[in-house]
Amino acid sequence: MNNRPRIGLGIIIVRDDGKILVAKRKGSHAQYYSIPGGHLELGETFEAGAVREVEEEHGIRIHDPQVIAITNSLETYHNEGLHYISVILLTSSFSGTPEIKEPNKCEGIMWVDPRHLPEPHFDASKLGIECWLKGVMYLGARS
């Protein structure tokens, strides 16, 4: 078990109709729905990491992602022993059609209303979306 939090990235991709892209995960955080995301690599900017992760996972190119929130995933820590601090980015600019590029990590993708998320939902994703909808950077301690 890692004795320090890890840095994650979560990317909210908004379509013209207001729906956001979510995936049904398998493997890591299995059986949870989540916005696209992953780990920040050494020496990488948040924006470059977001572009990389979305392209690796779903084959689309996002443009001009902006940092909008920070989450502290204590639910995941309590349930799985993994503590993540996640940087949440937002974009409505992308090219291509999302697909499953990593079938070992994802079993489905869909566009959903951000106010009616599928469950169970990964806590960093849910918190990031909640921050975005409320227009806040951070929601405070939740354990």
Image (spheres, rainbow, N blue to C red):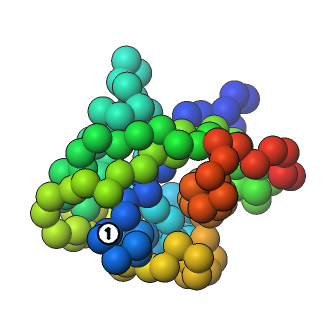
Q: What is the quadrant of the N terminus in the image? A: top right
Horizontal side of 125 relative to 83 (left or right) equals left
Does residue 82 show up? no
Q: Amino acid at mark 1?
A: Arg
Residue at x-position 32% and y-position 47%: 53
Above or below residue 96? Residue 8 is above
> Outermost residue toward the top?
43
Above or below residue 45? Residue 137 is below
Residue 40, image x and y in percent? 44, 33
Neighbours of disc 1 within 10 Å: few (<14), some (14-19), many (20+): some
Residue at x-position 41% and y-position 32%: 46
Does residue 33 show up? yes
How many numbered tags mark residues here?
1
Mark 1: secondary structure: loop
Above or below residue 28? Residue 47 is above
Residue 83, image x and y in percent? 69, 42
Residue 16, image x and y in percent? 30, 71
Residue 134, image x and y in percent? 66, 58
Residue at x-position 48% and y-position 79%: 113
Q: Nearer the viewer, residue 113 or 10?
A: 113
Residue at x-position 36% and y-position 24%: 44
Kindly identify which residue carries mark 1: 15
